[in-house]
Image (spheres, coloured by chain):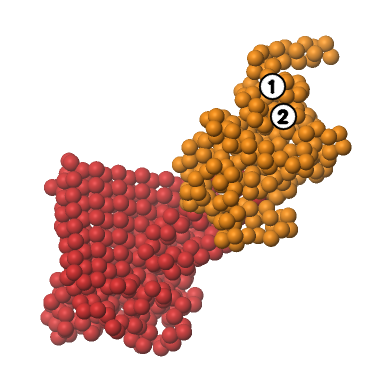
C-alpha cells in the first residue's frame, strides 16, 4: 500500500558491492516506505541476491560504495546481528543446514534474542512451544519440523517454509525474501504467500526478490523494479511484472542503454 | 610400542618405589604381578620416536616426581556428593586409588550382582576373577599397564552373574586429592552370559593439583550380554592421565561405550576391544574437548578376531587455544573374520589457529568378505552457519558457541544416563563459552 506520508524504512543510494573482488552491484538506488511491497526482478547475475546479502551483512559480500539507511541509521555501521535485532530480515535463497541444533531450540533462541532487543519479555520453553505450534499450523507445516535439526535433511520447499516461519516469529519491520518462491509447488507457494500477506501491516514492508511473476499473483507488489548489470534500471507498478513475463528482460535493458547513451 | 631394553629406566624405578613384593595368598596373582614387574623393569618409557606415541610427548610427565598415595586423605561425603550421578544408587569411591567404603554405596543389590572392592572379592570370587584379572589388559608392550599391575592391590570389582541385570547404573568414582601423587586405579568388570550392566567410570580431581592417574580397566562381556560403558575423564588441567582399557567380547555380546575427555594436561587412553566370539555388536563414541595447552590422545583398537562382528565408531575432537588432540583408530579384521562390518568416523573441530589435531585411521584387513570404512574430517566452524545464526540476531560469540556445542552434543546425547548428559552439556557449554 503506497502512502506518501509513510515513514521511510530503507533508503539505499548508489550501493556498490563486490563478491570475491568482482563488483556485482554498481550503484543501486531504492527507497522503501512502511506498508509497501516491492518486487525486485531481473535476469540471473543481475545483482539481486548480492544486493540482498550485502544489506544484511553477509561477510562474503563487500560493500564498496554508496550508502544505506535503515530507519535513518547507517546499515553498514551495524553488525549483522544488530541489523536483525533492529528488524531487518533476510529469507535466504539457500538456507544453511545446521545438524545438532534443534529447530525449536534455535527458533526460541532467535525469538528471545530479538524480543530482548525490543525490550520485551522472553518466553520459556513451554510458553514458546505453544506459541510456535500456532505459527507452524498457519504455515501448514508438520510439528515434527520443530524436533529436527535446523534445515537438516529438509526438502527445498521445507527450508523455504522454515524461513517464513522465522519471519512469522520474528515479525521484522523490513523483510527481504530472496527467491522464496523458487522450489515451491503451487500449493506451497499459496501457503507461503498467504502467510506473508497476513504478516503485512501499515508499519512494515516486504522486498521480494524473484525471477518469476507467479509469486506476484499472490503477493501484490506496489512497485516492481528491474535489475540489470548491478543497477535498478526500471521501476513500475504491478503491471510491469506481467509485461516482463510476456516480453522478457531484453527490451528493458535496450531501453535503459539507449537512455544512458543519450544522457 | 615400547621397546625392551636391558636397563631399568630411572623414571620407572621411581614409580616402582613402594611396590611390595608379590607375596599374597593367591599364587596366580603373585605370578602375574611378578611378571608385570619384570616387564615394568624391562620396558622403556615411550618417546615420540615410538610409532604409537609419535604425537604425544610425555616428557612433562617424567619430570615430576610422583610418590605413591600411601594413606589417602579422608574426605567427607559432601566433598564428592555432587560428582555422583543420582541414577547411580550403587557407587564405589576411590581416593588417590584407595577404596573409601564410607563414600561408597553398594548394599542391597539383587542376587547375582556384586559391586565391591577387589580385595574383598579376591578370595571369595577367585574363580570369576582369575580368568580375567591382569589377563585382558596386556602389559607386555605397555609400560604403564605393567606399572599399574605391579601396584595392583586395591580396585573395583563388578560382577553380574549369568542372566542377571544390575537395575541402575554403577558408578566407579576415582578422586585425585593429593598433590604429586601417582595413583593406580584398577577396575575389573565381569558381565556373564545374558547379563546386563551400565557402568560409569569417572575420574575427577579435587582442586588444581598435579597428579598422575595410571588406570587399567578390564571388562569381560559374556555371550549375548549387554554392557554400556561411560568413561569420563574430567581431571584437573594440571593432571596427567594414562589409561588402558581392555574389553573382551564373547558370542553375540553387545558393548556400547561413550568416552568423554575434558581434563588433564596430558592424557592418553588406549581402548582395546577384542572380539572373541561371533556376531558381536559394538558402538564406540568418543569426544575430546580440550583447550589451553592440553593434549588428549585416544588410541582405539577394534580387533575383529571372529566373524560377523559389527562395529560403529564415532570419535570427535573439539580443540581450542593451543591444545592438541590425537586420535588413532585401528581396526583389525583377522583371517576368517568374514562378514565383519566395521565403520569408523573421526570428526574434528579446530577453534583457533594454534589448535592442532592428528587423526589417523588404521585398517588392517585379512579377510575378503567384509565391509570396512573410515572417514576423517578436520575443520573450523562453517562461516555460512555462523552467519545464518547472526542474521537471526545471535551475537558472534553466541553463534559460535551454539555451533561448537552442537558438534559435541551429538556424542554427549548418546550417554544413557540423563543426569550426566545434562551435566556434561552444561560443562561443554561453559567450556565453549569460555572459548567464545
Residue B89: image tag = none
Which subunit holds the residue at mark 1?
Answer: A
Q: Chain A's shade in the image?
A: orange
**Residue B199 in the image: x percent, y percent?**
31, 69
Residue A258: quadrant of the picture: top right
Q: Which residue is mark 2?
A: A221
Which subunit holds the residue at mark 2?
Answer: A
| A48 sits left or right of A148 in the view | right
For image coordinates 58% across by 50% down, the residue present is A134
Please say if B212 is above or below B412.
below
For image coordinates 64% across by 21% down, the residue present is A43
Identify the image quadrant of the C terminus of chain B.
bottom right
Residue A3: quadrant of the picture: top right
For image coordinates 53% across by 61% down, the residue present is B429
Answer whether labels 2 and 1 touch (C-beta < 8 Å). yes
**Residue B334 in the image: x percent, y percent?**
17, 49
Question: Of label 2 and label 1, which has the lower sequence position?
Answer: 2
**Residue B82 in the image: x percent, y percent?**
46, 77
Q: Nearer the viewer, residue B16 or A206?
A: A206
Label 2 and label 1: CA atoms lie apart by 9 Å
Q: Which residue is mark 1?
A: A241
Is residue A115 something one can see in this rendering?
yes
| A226 sits left or right of A212 in the view | right
Chain with colour red in the figure: B
**Secondary structure type for disc 1:** helix
Amino acid at each position: 500500500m503506497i502512502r506518501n506520508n509513510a515513514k521511510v524504512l530503507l533508503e539505499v543510494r548508489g550501493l556498490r558491492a563486490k563478491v570475491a573482488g568482482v563488483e556485482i552491484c554498481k550503484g543501486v538506488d531504492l527507497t522503501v516506505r512502511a506498508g509497501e511491497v516491492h518486487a525486485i526482478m531481473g535476469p540471473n547475475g543481475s545483482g539481486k541476491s548480492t544486493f540482498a546479502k550485502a544489506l544484511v551483512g553477509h561477510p562474503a559480500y563487500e560493500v564498496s560504495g554508496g550508502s544505506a539507511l535503515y530507519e535513518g541509521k547507517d546499515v553498514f555501521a551495524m553488525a549483522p546481528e544488530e541489523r536483525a535485532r533492529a528488524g531487518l530480515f533476510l529469507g535466504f535463497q539457500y538456507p544453511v543446514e545446521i545438524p545438532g541444533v534443534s529447530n525449536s531450540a534455535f527458533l526460541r533462541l532467535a525469538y528471545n534474542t530479538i524480543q530482548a532487543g525490543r525490550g520485551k519479555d522472553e518466553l520459556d520453553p513451554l510458553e514458546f512451544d505453544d506459541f510456535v505450534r500456532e505459527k507452524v499450523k498457519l504455515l501448514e507445516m508438520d510439528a515434527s519440523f520443530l524436533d529436527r535439526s535446523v534445515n537438516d535433511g529438509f526438502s527445498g520447499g521445507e527450508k523455504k517454509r522454515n524461513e517464513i516461519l522465522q519471519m512469522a516469529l520474528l515479525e521484522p519491520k523490513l523483510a527481504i525474501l530472496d527467491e522464496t518462491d523458487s522450489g515451491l509447488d503451487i500449493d506451497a507457494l499459496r501457503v507461503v504467500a498467504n502467510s506473508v500477506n497476513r504478516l503485512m501491516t501499515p508499519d512494515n514492508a516486504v522486498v521480494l526478490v524473484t525471477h518469476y511473476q507467479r509469486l506476484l499473483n499472490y503477493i501484490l507488489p506496489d512497485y516492481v523494479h528491474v535489475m540489470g548489470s548491478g543497477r535498478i534500471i526500471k521501476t513500475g507498478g504491478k503491471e510491469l511484472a506481467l509485461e516482463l513475463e510476456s516480453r522478457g528482460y531484453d527490451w528493458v535493458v535496450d531501453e535503459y542503454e539507449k537512455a544512458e547513451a543519450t544522457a | 610400542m615400547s621397546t625392551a631394553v636391558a636397563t631399568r629406566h630411572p623414571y620407572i624405578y621411581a614409580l616402582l618405589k613402594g611396590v611390595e613384593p608379590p607375596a599374597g595368598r593367591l599364587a596366580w596373582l603373585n605370578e602375574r604381578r611378578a611378571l608385570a614387574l619384570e616387564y615394568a623393569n624391562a620396558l622403556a618409557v615411550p618417546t615420540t620416536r615410538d610409532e604409537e606415541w609419535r604425537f604425544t610427548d610425555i616428557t612433562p610427565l617424567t619430570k615430576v616426581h610422583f610418590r605413591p598415595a600411601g594413606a589417602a586423605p579422608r574426605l567427607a561425603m559432601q566433598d564428592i556428593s555432587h560428582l555422583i550421578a543420582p541414577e547411580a544408587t550403587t557407587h564405589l569411591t576411590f581416593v588417590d586409588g584407595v577404596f573409601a567404603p564410607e563414600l561408597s554405596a553398594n548394599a542391597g543389590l539383587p542376587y547375582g550382582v556384586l559391586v565391591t572392592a577387589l580385595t574383598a572379592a579376591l578370595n571369595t570370587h577367585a574363580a570369576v576373577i582369575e580368568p580375567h584379572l591382569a589377563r585382558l589388559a596386556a602389559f607386555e608392550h605397555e609400560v604403564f599397564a605393567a606399572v599399574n599391575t605391579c601396584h595392583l592391590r586395591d580396585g573395583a570389582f563388578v560382577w553380574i552373574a549369568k542372566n542377571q541385570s544390575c537395575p541402575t547404573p554403577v558408578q566407579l568414582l576415582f578422586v585425585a586429592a593429593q598433590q604429586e601423587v601417582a595413583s593406580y586405579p584398577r577396575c575389573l568388570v565381569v558381565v556373564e552370559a545374558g547379563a546386563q550392566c551400565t557402568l560409569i567410570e569417572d575420574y575427577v580431581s579435587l582442586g588444581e593439583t598435579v597428579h598422575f592417574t595410571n588406570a587399567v580397566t578390564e571388562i569381560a562381556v559374556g555371550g549375548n550380554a549387554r554392557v554400556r560403558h561411560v568413561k569420563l575423564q574430567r581431571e584437573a588441567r594440571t593432571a596427567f592421565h594414562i589409561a588402558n582399557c581392555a574389553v573382551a567380547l564373547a558370542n553375540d555380546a553387545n558393548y556400547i561405550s561413550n568416552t568423554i575427555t575434558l581434563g588433564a594436561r596430558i592424557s592418553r587412553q588406549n581402548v582395546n576391544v577384542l572380539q572373541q566370539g561371533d556376531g558381536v555388536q559394538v558402538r564406540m563414541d568418543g569426544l575430546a574437548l580440550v583447550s589451553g595447552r592440553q593434549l588428549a590422545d585416544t588410541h582405539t583398537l577394534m580387533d575383529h578376531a571372529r566373524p560377523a562382528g559389527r562395529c560403529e565408531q564415532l570419535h570427535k575432537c573439539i580443540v581450542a587455544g593451543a591444545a592438541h588432540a590425537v586420535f588413532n583408530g585401528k581396526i583389525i579384521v583377522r583371517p576368517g573374520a568374514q562378514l565383519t562390518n566395521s565403520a569408523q568416523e573421526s570428526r574434528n573441530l579446530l577453534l583457533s589457529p594454534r589448535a592442532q589435531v592428528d587423526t589417523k585411521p588404521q585398517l588392517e584387513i585379512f579377510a575378503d568378505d567384509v565391509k570396512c570404512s573410515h572417514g576423517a574430517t578436520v575443520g573450523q566452524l562453517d562461516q555460512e552457519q555462523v552467519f545464518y545464526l547472526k542474521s537471526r540476531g545471535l551475537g558472534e560469540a553466541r553463534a559460535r558457541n551454539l555451533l561448537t556445542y552442537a558438534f559435541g552434543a551429538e556424542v554427549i546425547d548418546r550417554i544413557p544416563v540423563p543426569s550426566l548428559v545434562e551435566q556434561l552439556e552444561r560443562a561443554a557449554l561453559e567450556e565453549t563459552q569460555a572459548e567464545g
